[in-house]
């Protein structure tokens, strides 16, 4: 089968198309013939030798990627939920070695859900790592409630555009941050208020909020303290809550934590239900061929991607 191998960390051109053996299945795994996969900033960080690279390099060959949608072509002998011919999607083995940049991917059945018939493989592949992150942060960690004021950083990006839709579905008042280029997109997603970070400082434009989803980190974190009310929550998905920030948050009675998404078929099932009913929509802004995966990496590296970038197989 064709796979994209990373022989050495570095530039996008280090991603090399090669012929390798199809994966062999463990009893709890299914073999998926991939139809589409999606690219995330963690793919770029790992390609550069950071993020997950330290673990992946111990299990050569290094194959990046976690987000897939495709068809089950073989099942391990302990698999109960899926059969050959099922269309499935999910984030495979994250954190860990997903090996999704390949024609065939071996995935534990507990990381997958059936793809809703009403959405394409491209939309399904897009609604995996980024959508799971938004779901796990807002619903499971922060337990957002109707009427709460929710502040979503980078609201036009992969995680952000799902987070806006999920928070709106819960019934929150949603404030989304993006440049003016994404004003109409944020309106379509349903934000109650758009902060254009190129024109205004959010801490000057806003009254207090109940929750902040941080995807930028750094200096931004101390600015959030100006808008978070007593007992409010801050969750950073980029490790923005370091020891010093945690101490400052504690002193202000703000619950602050970092969060890392993990694979979950149960959560994928919840997302599948929202996608099937149209409550949640994946916005795929660009599609690339498997051979041009390096260009997809270059696009994500701009930091300006709207929604998601998807790779087509077949
Ligand atoms: N911990 C976890 O489990 C986890 C999970 C997923 C992602 N992450 C991390 O979270 C970060 C975001 O991921 P993602 O997939 O959403 O990234 P992404 O899709 O690449 O984000 C792109 C978006 O960022 C926006 N943006 C860029 N600079 C901004 C700024 N200064 N203020 C506000 N928005 C800005 C852009 O909007 P404009 O074009 O309008 O500027 C663009 O739409 C990444 O670092 C990723 O690695 C962590």
Image (spheres, helix red, strand yellow):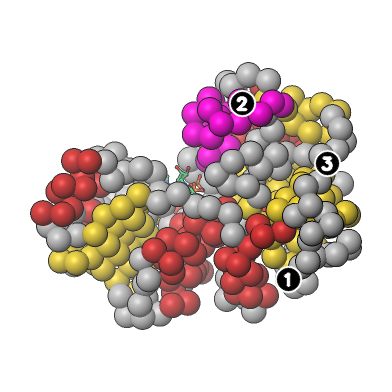
Foreground residue, 136 or 123? Answer: 136
Check if residue 48 falls in the magenta segment.
yes
N-terminal label among 2 and 3: 3
Label 2 vs label 1, nearer the camera: 2
Q: Which residue is mark 3?
A: 24
Q: Which residue is mark 2?
A: 58
Foreground residue, 205 or 281? Answer: 281
Is label 1 in a helix, a strand or a loop?
Answer: loop
Q: Which residue is mark 1?
A: 116
Is label 3 in a helix, a strand or a loop?
Answer: loop
Count residues near mark 3 (Cα–Cα under 10 Å), then give few for <14, some for 14-19, many for 20+: few
Q: Is residue 211 above or below residue 75?
A: below
Q: Is residue 138 left or right of residue 246?
A: right
Name the quadrant of the N terminus: top right
Task: Tell me the magenta residue range.
Answer: 41-61
Q: Is residue 259 above or below residue 136?
A: above
Q: Are marks 2 and 1 in contact (CB under 8 Å)?
A: no
N-terminal label among 3 and 1: 3
Ligand 1 contact, mark 2 (Cβ < 8 Å):
no
């Amino acid at each position: 089968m064709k796979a994209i191998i990373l022989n050495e960390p570095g530039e996008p051109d280090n991603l090399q198309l090669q012929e390798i053996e199809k994966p062999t299945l463990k009893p709890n795994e299914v073999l998926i013939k991939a139809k589409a996969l999606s690219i995330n900033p963690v793919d770029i960080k790992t390609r550069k030798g950071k993020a997950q690279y330290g673990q992946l390099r111990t299990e050569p060959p290094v194959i990046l990627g976690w987000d897939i949608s495709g068809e089950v072509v073989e099942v391990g002998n302990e698999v109960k939920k899926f059969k050959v011919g099922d269309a499935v999607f999910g984030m495979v083995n994250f954190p860990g070695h997903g090996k999704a940049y390949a024609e065939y991917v071996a995935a534990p059945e507990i990381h997958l859900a059936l793809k809703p018939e009403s959405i394409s493989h491209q939309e399904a592949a897009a609604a995996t790592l980024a959508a799971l992150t938004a779901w796990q942060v807002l619903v499971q960690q922060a337990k957002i409630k109707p009427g709460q004021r929710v502040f979503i950083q980078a609201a036009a990006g992969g995680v952000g555009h799902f987070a806006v839709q999920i928070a709106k579905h819960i019934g929150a008042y949603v404030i989304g941050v993006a440049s003016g280029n994404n004003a109409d997109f944020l309106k379509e997603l349903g934000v109650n208020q758009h902060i254009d970070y190129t024109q205004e400082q959010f801490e000057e434009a806003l009254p207090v909020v109940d929750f902040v989803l941080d995807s930028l980190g750094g200096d931004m974190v101390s600015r959030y303290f100006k808008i978070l009310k007593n007992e409010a929550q801050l969750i950073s998905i980029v490790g923005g809550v370091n020891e010093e920030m945690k101490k400052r948050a504690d002193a202000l009675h703000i619950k602050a934590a970092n969060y890392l998404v993990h694979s979950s078929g149960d959560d994928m099932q919840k997302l599948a239900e929202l996608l099937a009913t149209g409550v949640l929509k994946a916005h795929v802004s660009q599609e690339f061929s498997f051979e041009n995966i390096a260009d997809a990496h270059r696009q994500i590296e701009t930091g300006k991607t709207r929604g998601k970038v998807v790779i087509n197989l077949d």
